Image (cartoon, helix red, strand yellow):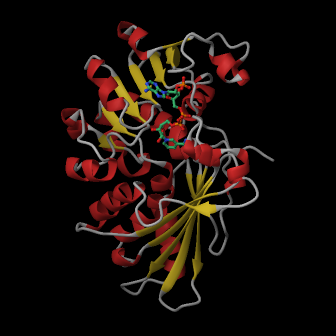
Amino acid sequence: MSDTINVAILGASGYTGAELLRFLLNHPKVRIAALTADRKAGTTIAEAFPQFVGCDLPRLITIAEVDWAGVDLVFCALPHATTQEVLKAVPARIKIVDLSADFRLSDPAAYEYWYGHAHQALELQKEAVYGITEFAREKVAEARLVANPGCYTTCSQLPVIPLIEAGAIDPDEIVIDAKSGVTGAGRSLKEANLYCEVADGFHAYGVGHHRHMAELEEGFSRAAGRRVLCSFTPHLVPMNRGMLATVYVKLVGGATPQSISEILAQRFTGETFVKVLPFGTAPQTRHVRGSNRAYIGVFADRRPGRAIVMCAIDNLVKGASGQAIQNMNCMMGWPEDLGIETVGVFP
Ligand SMILES: NC(=O)c1ccc[n+]([C@@H]2O[C@H](COP(=O)([O-])OP(=O)(O)OC[C@H]3O[C@@H](n4cnc5c(N)ncnc54)[C@H](OP(=O)(O)O)[C@@H]3O)[C@@H](O)[C@H]2O)c1
């Protein structure tokens, strides 16, 4: 096991950056070397998030001011398209966990199609390892650059990929209905995220063409060994954090709702963070809030030959910063749960 490392968080004044810091403050093998911000550079992290008042932490600086000589690993919690520019200046010895979408798609043409511009760091994109830790821990352990998956895609792939791999569901018949808390949209000011726009109601967005479809379809296609398309509709619900994916699947090869629940239970036996609930139990976002856990539940559909699979995570933890730390632990050869052992918080 390696000794203590120096870590920089780029985008520390954002939601996922602060969530990284919340966990890393208690990580026994991490020292915080640098925290960056954009508009808030020059201030303190306690000014951005008073939760950190009294913590001995570096001031928020710009990325250009980071002294890379004192950094072993960097978390990038920046808006998409920012990281690929920034990383060109990062020395090759430094390990990277990127929370943005910049390195998640292995196909540059798909990236260009979904994000509307050519990728600016194709060499880095080639070496990036896509890291849902439970599915990729051997590759993550060897990686220099890990593309941390999105929240919707973690929540949707965890319960579905083992079923595709087992040949228990038809990959062409996956329908995902997913809901996110408002922190999923980040902390920067957007009219659509004002209190009056999100409170007391909820709505779908990106209907029929949300960017996370590309990431989902890459994951499902890898598992199926052929090209797979899926239906996916995200919704914004008036809560701060939490994410629930309800996935409708068509059973094949003699599978039953009970047997796919068993497949999932066996696949995740021994996993610290992924828990398959007793058959017919609906996972709730409240029960994983603040933790790196994913709760999965399976139900029979009233229509024969079909089932409903659900997964609940905290979008900021298993959907972002918790999984990023899980990946760092894996890259460093440390126990995967170091610093992120906590169960969900109570109301
Ligand atoms: N929120 C989630 O649930 C979630 C889940 C999975 C993945 N992600 C991904 O994680 C990344 C960060 O998300 P977030 O929700 O933490 O975003 P956020 O709350 O908006 O924070 C963005 C951070 O980046 C900084 N920043 C903004 N523009 C910059 C620029 N041009 N150059 C340098 N720094 C810049 C901001 O600094 P200032 O505060 O000074 O402006 C802030 O520290 C995004 O790519 C997002 O898609 C988010």
| Outermost residue, left side | 123
The image shows residue 295, relative to residue 96, as above or below, that is: below
Q: How many marks?
A: 0
Q: Is residue 247 above or below residue 292?
A: below
Q: Residue furthest bottom?
A: 304
Is residue 1 visible to us here? no
Residue at 74 percent of width and 43 percent of height: 345
- Residue 317 drawn at (x, y percent): 57, 42
Quick one: 52 or 275, which is closer to the camera?
Answer: 52
Point 51% across, 52% down: residue? 270
Quadrant, the N terminus: top left
Do we see residue 323 in this rendering? yes
Q: Nearer the viewer, residue 188 or 154?
A: 188
Q: Would you identify the image quadrant in which residue 294 lies?
A: bottom right
Query: Is 49 on the left or on the right of 173, as rendered?
Result: right
Across and down, in percent, residue 304 comes to: 51, 92
Q: Position of residue 17 (x, y in %)?
A: 54, 29
State the image quarter where residue 308 is shown: bottom right
Q: Is residue 329 left or right of residue 300?
A: left
Residue 316 locus on image (x, y percent): 58, 42
Seen from this angle, which residue lies furthest right?
A: 347
For the residue pair 94 and 232, the one nearer the viewer reads as: 232
**Which sits in the foreground, 138 or 219?**
219
Q: Residue at x 50, y 26 (%)?
A: 11
